[in-house]
Image: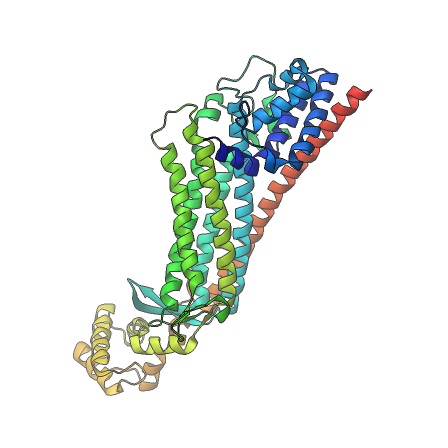
Amino acid sequence: MLGPLFENMKRHHWRHLMRVNDAHAVMLAEQGLLTADEAAAILNALEAIETDVASRLDEVGVGSAEEDLFCVIEDDLRRRLGIAVAGRLHTGRSRNDIDHTLFNLALRDKVLALSEALVHLIDGVIAVATRHRDTLVVAYTHGQPAQPTTWGHYLAALIEVLLRDVDRLSQALRMVDQSAMGAAAITTTGFPIDRPRMAELLGFTKVQENTYGCIAAADGTTGVYAALKVMFLNIGRFVQDLNQWAGFEVGQLHVPDTFVQRSSIMPQKRNPVPIEHLRVMCSLGVSCCDGVMLAVHNTPFTDVNDTEHEAQETGYRAFDTAGRVVALLNGFLEVATINTAVVRRHIDQSYITITEVADSLVRAEGISFGQAHSICSWLARHMGEQGETLATVPYAVFAAAFAAAVDRPPGLAEAEFRRIGTPEHFIAVRTHCGGPAPAPMDRSLAGYRDQVEIDRARLADHHRRIEAAAVKLADRVAHWQRTARK
């Protein structure tokens, strides 16, 4: 039963465990709980064990007394030094606080890596949106053509969602970027340990204060997977649009041959299978996140296995899936294009610019929106019945509808009537914040670039702090090794 968990520990926690051991030995020495000679012996032995075990990690497995990596290292340390010295390393700690610290270290790494991948994806989407700021597409509501917008404007909505995903992951990172070391089993210890020093040496931003909560609370883990689940849901919904847009009946999204799978029997088939892979991976990612949530649901508020290795491994699979999703989506959006001829045809046939015709009538003719809506609603039904478009419907038909509703002829000339029905006019007048017109789009894109730089700088700060802590720990390890030699 423990075999798979052992393998998962080797994959996700091996290096972190060795770092925790080193940090704990340094802290014990600094607190006078290890002599200089004991500290040097333990740290030298840990260095040798790391080198030795790393060289044969694939061979290391569950034994009669070695149920996890902690036991492997503990037993090896005792063989090298004897229990009188080796046994001092475990002073003031427990596998409980070690495990929860390992989980936080692993989740911190995974959240940082995914956040960086998301920022890279957002960079790519911003580039595509910038190139296609003015490329027309049909926007849908309730599965039906609604209004024209641009590919850039549509992608800007995805950019904002992804930026919020990065922010949610950042909030989740704050919860796991805390050290549980020193909580011991659940109530800390009577030994004069230094919990803040352990957090510092491991590169955490702070100590998780309440020691009962260090072991019993699982909201750091569930907070991470709640944020990750929302990311999968967001991307999955966007991918479902891509699936509709790439379908033959809509056809406004063109998928190049490099992202198409051919049928083995039907010569004409071009299956955009990356979209389906993205969709199923998002669903599977959600299921892994839900798996963690359900494992924790209705468990006692204490130390239980339900929140530990089995659940953590299920969650780690969600991160593996997320990495694949983000990479594939980035590559797909870089090469997918809009079929502008199809878009133009759909705009004409669905007369989705007629909302702006109604708005323009209000402004030009001084009538109420209710009157304008009534005129345009009748006109849309007429065009549908006659197979006409706003470019081909006789001006006299419009004029008659206007006169019937307002009891006077329109002042709008035919040339102006044709102009206000174009998608270019529709886009151009939507200049408010967040709209698809060029000016607000340029402001939005500039703001997204600024936010990406802020996020990138924040992630870089995390890495610098973690790397600085690793250097500091290595320096302190070397210090205690040198002290004993003197």
Compare residues 304 and 134 and report the one nearer the observer: 304
Residue 268 sits above or below residue 193 on the image: below
Residue drawn at x 58%, y 17% as measured from the top left: 92
Residue drawn at x 56%, y 46% as measured from the top left: 113
Compare residues 122 and 153 and report the one nearer the observer: 122
**Residue 441: % across, % down:** 47, 64
**Residue 84: % across, % down:** 66, 13
Does residue 9 appear to the left or right of 349 in the view shown?
right
Residue 73 sits above or below residue 140 on the image: above
Query: Does the rendering let one see residue 409?
Result: no
> Which image quarter is the C terminus in?
top right
Residue drawn at x 52%, y 28% as measured from the top left: 99
Residue drawn at x 70%, y 35% as measured from the top left: 471
Residue 213 sits above or below residue 311 on the image: above
Identify the image quadrant of residue 108: top right
**Residue 175: % across, % down:** 49, 35
